[in-house]
Image (spheres, rainbow, N blue to C red):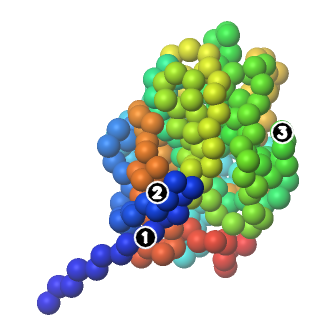
Amino acid sequence: VRSTRLNMSIITHKGGLLLGRQSDAIFSTNLAGEWRTSTGAAQTHYWVNQTGGNALRKFNGISKTNSGSLHYWAPDGTNDYLGVASSGYGGSPFTVNTNNAFTIASWYYHLSNLVHPFFSFPHSALPLSELYLETGVAVANKISLAPTVGVGVSTFDFTLVNAKWYYVALTFDGTNKWTLFINGSFIGEATQADGGNGAQALSVGALEVGFGAGLTYSSNNVRFSDVHVYTAALTNSQIRQNFLAGHDINDYRHFGTSLGSVA
């Protein structure tokens, strides 16, 4: 006899209640990039895109750690990141069209006063168009957004709790509106132009602090996992589905409220 289990969740928002069905799989429509730490790299120097698209290079041997069912990347704080692949290192760069709508998200384990560029588009042609989220620099333990270097930084009103996993997602509507979601919940919006530089190569764990000024990298002890890129601005419920697919209430038991036995 085969049984079927249906799990329901109730999500509270300022506007009321939203019913959401838990899913065992991430939202797949418009998914252009997916890098899962639970799936090993095909080669030493790059990480395979599970959608069949271009890979991300493992710069300076950024390590992957396994602990039970939990998997994550662990940069050393010096120059470890995922970024532009090239011949012999996974093929052509993975790019995001910054003129169009998109969503980028990943799991992140927060420890106080650490820097972590969730993603960025460094080394683009002038005028420099760069998007990054960081913690511990602009405002300690908060998340900041700077779509174009030199334009200014928007800081979202959300304080990260120490020693906790978060599913962080940022959407861009293709014009000038950016929306931040954490663990499937709406956090805030920012209005800034993106610079309009078209297709830009993606980096995770590194950002350029100014054109030609070099890179800033994720701090030692940062942990992140399962990067997702979409060619559309996902809705709240779609991002919530991704959160539920990786959260420890699901059978996978990847990401919970703490790093647990691998701290």
- Quadrant of the snapshot with the C terminus: bottom right
Question: In this view, which residue lies farthest toward the front?
Answer: 15
- Residue at image mark 2: 240
Q: Is any part of residue 1 visible from this angle?
A: yes
Give residue 33's quadrant in the image.
top left
Give residue 1's quadrant in the image.
bottom left
x%, y% of residue 185? 55, 55
Which circle marks residue 138 in the picture?
Answer: 3
x%, y% of residue 3? 21, 85
- Residue at image mark 1: 9
Q: In this view, does 113 lie to the left or right of 223?
A: right
Query: Mark 1 and mark 3: span between their CA atoms?
Result: 35 Å
Q: Is residue 64 left or right of residue 30?
A: right
The residue at the point 42 percent across, 53 percent down is 237
Of marks 3 and 2, which one's residue comes earlier in the chain? 3
The residue at the point 67 percent across, 79 percent down is 261
The residue at the point 75 percent across, 39 percent down is 155
Name the foreground residue: 191 vs 14.
14
x%, y% of residue 151? 75, 20
Query: Mark 3 and mark 2: span between their CA atoms?
Result: 27 Å
Element carrying mark 3: loop
